[in-house]
Image (spheres, helix red, strand yellow):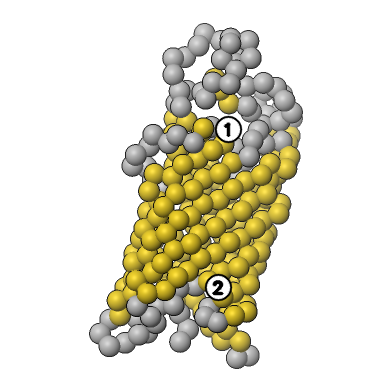
Amino acid sequence: MYEHFIVGDYIVRPNAYNQFAPGTNVATWGPSFAGRAAVEFPLFNIPFMVEGYGEQYAFTHPGGARPANPNCNTNGLAGNPACVTPIGAGVGSFWVPQFQAINSDASVRAGLQIANPRVYLAGAYLWTSNNYGYPRMTGAGFGLEKLPDLDKSVSLFGSVYYFPVVQGNFTDPTSGRLYTVQDRFLQYQAGVAWNTPFGFSKQSGVFVEAGYMGNSTINKQFLPSNGHEAGAFAGIGIHF
């Protein structure tokens, strides 16, 4: 049986550690979600898969009383969670008012089955974006993925993908200097799926899933910090 499925997940109050967030997310109900669609097919009697994946993490940048001088290094607020270090070569940090930040990414994946049941070695291409003015970034990577076995009532699934160079261009609005920012990106997901077939057919049905997911970024060039976003998720999908 070759699987074809689509599923959407809600990520429950994810935590974020980066230049905007110290790991205390106060957005109790924010737009954090993920989704994926995958197709398995044979080619020369070898199972392949193609998948589209997307996710979005929402988290809160803490604020506070607005200081008269936004330069945190001269007003005594250096180290305050509301202070943010900008992109570029060390120029200190600046106070940023509270807002809900959103990090998004999407990827396409294509893989060759290397083990049963449904374990794939895959290549991938990633696009990232955000709502706070940082550059959109892209990069190629690779990973391992275990698809759910939706011909069974209960099955495990998971994936881990690594993108060694993800990059984009950023122009400093003050100096006009162009920076090519880069990071390493690690993305992971693990969970369990419960399947309910339509009628007596194992070929199609509805399934629910739950688990844990996240991603990590490691600065390579000009970004102000590393980052990590993660949370529990639950969702519903259909296979056919």
Q: Which residue corresponds to mark 2?
A: 50
Residue at 68% in and 59% down:
140
- The correct choice, above or below, for 101 with respect to 212 in the image is above
Question: Which class describes the residues within 10 Å of circle 1: few (<14), some (14-19), or many (20+)?
Answer: some
Residue 82's tag is: none
Q: Can residue 239 be seen in this view?
A: no
- Determine the CA span between mark 1 and mark 2: 34 Å
Q: Do the residues labelled 1 and 2 touch (CB within 8 Å)?
A: no
Whichever of labels 1 and 2 marks the residue nearer the N terminus, that label is 1
Residue at 58% in and 32% down:
19
Residue at 65% in and 33% down:
224
Q: Is residue 185 left or right of residue 153?
A: right
- The correct choice, above or below, for 63 with respect to 215 in the image is above
Q: Is mark 2 on a helix, strand or loop?
A: strand
Number of labels in the image equals 2
- The correct choice, above or below, for 160 with respect to 11 in the image is below
Amino acid type, label 2 = Val
Work out which residue is located at the far bottom of the displayed protein and give it. Answer: 45
Between 72 and 103, the residue placed more toward the observer is: 72
Q: Which residue corresponds to mark 1?
A: 19
- The correct choice, above or below, for 169 with respect to 205 in the image is above
